């Protein structure tokens, strides 16, 4: 029941057989952090920092950013905070950024690509994060990474920012949200400190279906076996280098997907705050051996519909 879920929500995420799965929250403002903590979030798995950059004439100063990140860290009260660097593109024009009109913004100069075109802004954001967020809580994550060369360029800027602030170096991770990053996760995991699957974009790019197009949006299902195989490749890459790997796209909020994601080997699920109590309750009913079997079976399916019916049956049997 809802009341029982809420009462148990403050306990750490764990499967029925005691395997630890961290349950974090996706946030896009300071206000949401209180709600997330009240709902049982064990940390923030994705802070979408765009809120600081949109709807204004000039970029936020380093001081303004640092104060804002510090406030969110304070509300999380010591819990880990994963801050994603700016992730916008041609679909959300910003007057102070170099954004020519693009025919296909989803494949354009967005995310890390845009940040690398404005290294001054990226470095200012790195410094603001390092100065604002207590070292024990701080982790930084890059969006839309494709390969190691791109990561190396970002890391060089990050190393400069670390040197300039003189504060301890926080872990620098990547989002795996392009099929390229999933296929190259082995090499990327050698360089990056952690990985987090952005299943919204990963699904859009794997299935060649626009997230924002009403005609193709129904095709966007992260439980498609093509997406699950990319996730499995990402987990294998992370494991080879002993890296922590989570998921922060929409499917991480879906209790039906949780058993498969956990069975595939994820360490963390980052969900919308409202979904956390039900997600933790669903995970407490999952047995790891069954989750692994379900994930194996899902990888062998032909369609998302087949995976959904498999998962639905497995959950019904476990209940
Ligand atoms: C994703 O792509 O899954 C993700 C978490 O990032 P966003 O939804 O902000 O693109
Ligand atoms: Mg994304």
Image (tube, grey):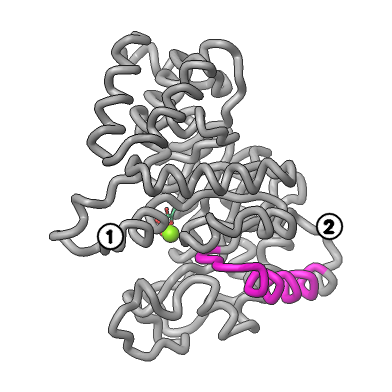
Residue located at (76% from left, 72% from top): 161
Q: Based on the displayed image, in which of its 4 quarters is residue 168 positioned?
A: bottom right
Q: Return the residue at label 1.
A: 211
Q: Within the magenta stretch, is there residue 157?
A: yes
The circle drawn on residue 168 is 2
Residue located at (40% from left, 72% from top): 54
Q: Based on the displayed image, in which of its 4 quarters is residue 190 positioned?
A: bottom right
Q: CA distance from mark 2 to mark 1?
A: 38 Å
Q: Is residue 314 above or below residue 71?
A: above
Viewer-nearest residue: 240 or 166: 240
2 lies left or right of 6: left
Can residue 274 be seen here? The reply is no
Q: Is residue 136 above or below residue 318?
A: below
Q: Residues within 10 Å of mark 2 (few under 14, many from 20)?
A: some
Viewer-nearest residue: 253 or 54: 253
Residue located at (41% from left, 36% from top): 299
Q: Within the magenta stretch, is there residue 289?
A: no
**Residues drawn in magenta:** 143-162
Can residue 33 be seen here? The reply is yes
């Amino acid at each position: 029941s809802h009341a029982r879920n809420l009462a148990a929500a403050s306990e750490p995420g764990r499967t029925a057989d005691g395997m630890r799965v961290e349950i974090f929250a996706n946030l896009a403002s300071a206000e949401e952090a209180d709600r997330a903590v009240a709902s049982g979030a064990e940390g923030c798995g994705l802070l979408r920092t765009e809120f600081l950059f949109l709807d204004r004439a000039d970029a936020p100063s380093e001081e303004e950013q640092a104060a804002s990140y510090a406030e969110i860290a304070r509300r999380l009260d010591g819990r880990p905070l994963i801050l994603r660097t700016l992730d916008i593109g041609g679909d959300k024009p910003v007057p102070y950024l170099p954004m020519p009109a693009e025919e296909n913004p989803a494949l354009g100069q967005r995310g890390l690509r845009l940040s690398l075109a404005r290294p001054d802004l990226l470095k200012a954001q790195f410094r603001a994060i390092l100065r604002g967020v207590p070292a024990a809580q701080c982790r930084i994550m890059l969006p839309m990474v494709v390969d190691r060369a791109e990561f190396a360029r970002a890391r060089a800027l990050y190393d400069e920012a670390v040197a300039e602030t003189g504060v301890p170096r926080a872990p620098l991770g990547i989002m795996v949200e392009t099929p390229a990053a999933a296929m190259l996760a082995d090499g990327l995991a050698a360089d990056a400190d952690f990985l987090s699957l952005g299943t919204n974009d990963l699904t859009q790019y794997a299935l060649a279906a626009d997230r924002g197009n009403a005609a193709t949006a129904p095709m966007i299902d992260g439980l498609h076996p093509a997406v699950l195989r990319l996730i499995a490749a990402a987990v294998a890459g992370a494991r080879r280098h002993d890296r922590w790997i989570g998921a922060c796209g929409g499917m991480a909020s879906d209790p039906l997907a949780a058993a498969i994601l956990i069975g595939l080997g994820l360490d963390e699920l980052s969900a919308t705050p409202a979904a956390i109590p039900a997600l933790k309750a669903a995970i407490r009913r999952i047995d790891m051996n069954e989750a692994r079997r379900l994930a194996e079976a899902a990888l062998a399916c032909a369609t998302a519909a087949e995976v959904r019916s498999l998962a639905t049956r497995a959950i019904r049997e476990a209940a």
